Image: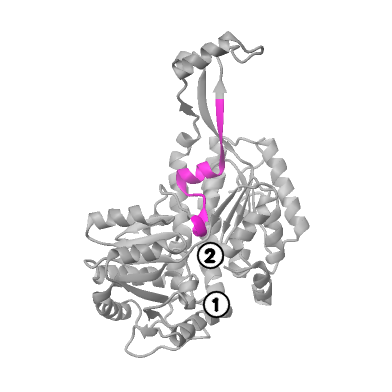
């Protein structure tokens, strides 16, 4: 179904440029002139139909759902091509299911969200005047998406964007060329280009994309590039939503170093081979239970993967450059005194053919090590210890605010305390990453991990102009502000100040 349109992560731009490879460039790049032509076509189409009906918006969401169902096998094949190994179940569960569940949730609630929201007016002073908030589409939205979840990061926000009545142009990463090209084909079959379209290109196109006068710009990536995107958008005063990741901590209370906690940790860390922005980036365990934690990891991991670096369900690292980066992190940590622990009875080796590195715990890391300076995006887990929970809280608060924080405890008071005394975009108690599974909950960062929220109702509001509307009828204050100012305005002032 083609939706109707005629119904009137810490890398400077210079480094990114240097890191481009021939394999990473999309095969059918969009020129800058073509990008501007598509943008102009969407702006004109929006002017013809600035407030799509509920029916039109529901049809657009149904088109997204039909698109992902019809292209499931294409998505699975594309991700396998880009990551070398990428289990089909992870492709569908990790990229498409969240889009489908979000769209269905939004369709169920959209009629209610679109209704004007009444606001209280002082009827003594303003008589029968009324006020309300109208949720108005903002226009044409740009979405710059990352390589790690190319379909999810492109299509999940698209649900919110279209539900709010907007049009959209998506710029996926050049680092996943097959997935980006597949996404472009999928969207082209489902939507007219003046409604939703995908553009392909490298850093030059991305830089131009960020400079354009969007009505809203969404960027998902790392803080270094996020700053450049925000700076470019500022020339047009373009509002931005930034999802920038960060080093998400997992804190384990002394009463929760057990099989369930460690199983949750390992499952979350190996999902996409650690290449997600909400993966637990480092772990805090009680000092006296570090060895018990390691022992549980060694016991549980082989039951999940008999081996790690050659297992077909272990997702490959995105490219050789990132593989080398992870190897460098391990070498750097070892040289600076950390103890590296693998989880099998035999030491695994780097599998360069399939781009996989051994799952490794880095014990007692210091902030001078690369694994603690940077978001890891791989199967490496620094393990720190604490004597009192205050130490873990203090460490988290002395660093940049993360996208997510996870705390395992059986003590409600401790759970409440950690939530009160730390900051993060999202948080889970006795769970990891599961806050993103629920379409009713907003998603986003704080500080260095981003700004703004999307998903569900918050996403609808993010991509809407919350327009205050006041309709005047009889008012006690009528004419009080007409010059010359005199006794009538004095009476208004005295009335308000109760003098």
Quadrant in the picture for residue 205: bottom right
- First to last magenta residue range: 447-469
Left or right of 436, for residue 193: right
Residue under numbered circle 1: 322
Q: Quadrant of the C terminus?
A: top left
For this orientation, the residue located farthest to the front is 499
Q: Earlier in the sequence, mark 2 or mark 1?
A: 2
In the depicted structure, whether residue 105 falls above or below residue 171: above
Mark 2 vs mark 1, foreground winner is: 1
Between 53 and 34, the one nearer to me in the picture: 34
Between 492 and 142, the one nearer to me in the picture: 492
Res. 70 visible in picture: no
Between 25 and 337, the one nearer to me in the picture: 337
Q: Return the mark for residue 75.
A: 2
For this orientation, the residue located farthest to the top is 487
Q: Residue 28 at x, y = what percent?
A: 71, 66
Residue at point 58%, 48% (across, down): 1
In the rendered structure, does residue 461 fall within the stretch colored magenta? yes
Between the residue at mark 2 and the residue at mark 1, the CA separation in whole angstroms equals 22 Å
Q: Residue 39 at x, y = what percent?
A: 71, 49
Left or right of 485, for residue 351: left
Left or right of 208, for residue 168: left
In the depicted structure, whether residue 69 falls above or below residue 262: above
Between 362 and 175, the one nearer to me in the picture: 362
């Amino acid at each position: 179904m083609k939706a109707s349109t005629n119904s009137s992560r810490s890398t400077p731009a210079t480094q990114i440029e240097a890191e481009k490879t021939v394999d990473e460039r999309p095969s059918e790049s969009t020129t800058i002139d073509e990008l501007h032509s598509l943008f102009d076509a969407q702006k004109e189409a929006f002017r013809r139909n600035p407030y799509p009906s509920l029916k039109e918006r529901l049809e657009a969401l149904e088109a997204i759902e039909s698109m992902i169902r019809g292209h499931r096998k294409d998505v699975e094949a594309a991700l396998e091509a880009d990551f070398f190994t990428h289990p089909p179940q992870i492709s569908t569960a990790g990229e498409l299911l969240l889009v489908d569940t979000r769209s269905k949730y939004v369709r169920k609630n959209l009629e209610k969200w679109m209704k004007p929201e009444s606001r209280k007016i002082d009827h003594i002073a303003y008589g029968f005047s009324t006020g309300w908030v109208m949720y108005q589409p903002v226009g044409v939205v740009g979405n710059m998406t990352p390589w790690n979840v190319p379909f999810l990061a492109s299509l999940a926000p698209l649900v919110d964007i279209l539900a709010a009545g907007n049009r959209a142009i998506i710029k996926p990463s050049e680092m996943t060329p097959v997935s980006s090209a597949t996404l472009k084909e999928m969207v082209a079959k489902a939507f007219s280009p003046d409604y939703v379209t995908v553009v392909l290109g490298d850093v030059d196109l991305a830089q131009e994309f960020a400079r354009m006068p969007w009505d809203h710009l969404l960027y998902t990536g790392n803080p270094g590039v996020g700053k450049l995107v925000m700076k470019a958008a500022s020339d047009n005063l373009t509002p931005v939503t930034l999802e920038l990741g960060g080093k998400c901590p997992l804190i384990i209370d002394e009463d929760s170093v057990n099989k369930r906690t460690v199983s949750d940790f390992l499952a979350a860390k190996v999902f996409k081979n650690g290449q997600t922005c909400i993966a637990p980036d480092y772990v805090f365990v009680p000092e006296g239970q570090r060895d018990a934690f390691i022992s549980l990891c060694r016991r549980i991991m082989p039951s999940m993967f008999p081996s790690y670096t050659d297992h077909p369900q272990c997702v490959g690292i995105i490219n050789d450059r990132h593989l080398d980066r992870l190897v460098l992190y391990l070498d750097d940590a070892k040289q600076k005194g950390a103890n590296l622990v693998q989880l099998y009875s035999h030491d695994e080796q780097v599998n360069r053919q399939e781009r996989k590195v051994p799952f490794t715990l880095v014990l007692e890391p210091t902030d001078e090590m690369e694994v603690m300076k940077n978001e890891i995006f791989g199967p490496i887990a620094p393990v720190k210890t604490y004597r009192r929970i205050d130490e873990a809280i203090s460490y988290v608060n002395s660093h940049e605010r993360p996208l997510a924080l996870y705390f395992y405890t059986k003590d409600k008071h401790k759970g409440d305390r950690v939530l009160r005394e730390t900051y993060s975009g999202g948080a889970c108690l006795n769970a990891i990453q599961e806050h993103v599974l629920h379409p009713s909950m907003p998603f986003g960062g704080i500080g260095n991990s981003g700004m703004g929220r999307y998903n569900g109702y918050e996403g609808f509001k993010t991509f809407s102009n919350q327009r205050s509307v006041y309709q005047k009828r009889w008012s006690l204050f009528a004419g009080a502000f007409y010059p010359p100012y005199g006794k009538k305005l004095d009476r208004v002032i005295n009335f308000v100040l109760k003098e």
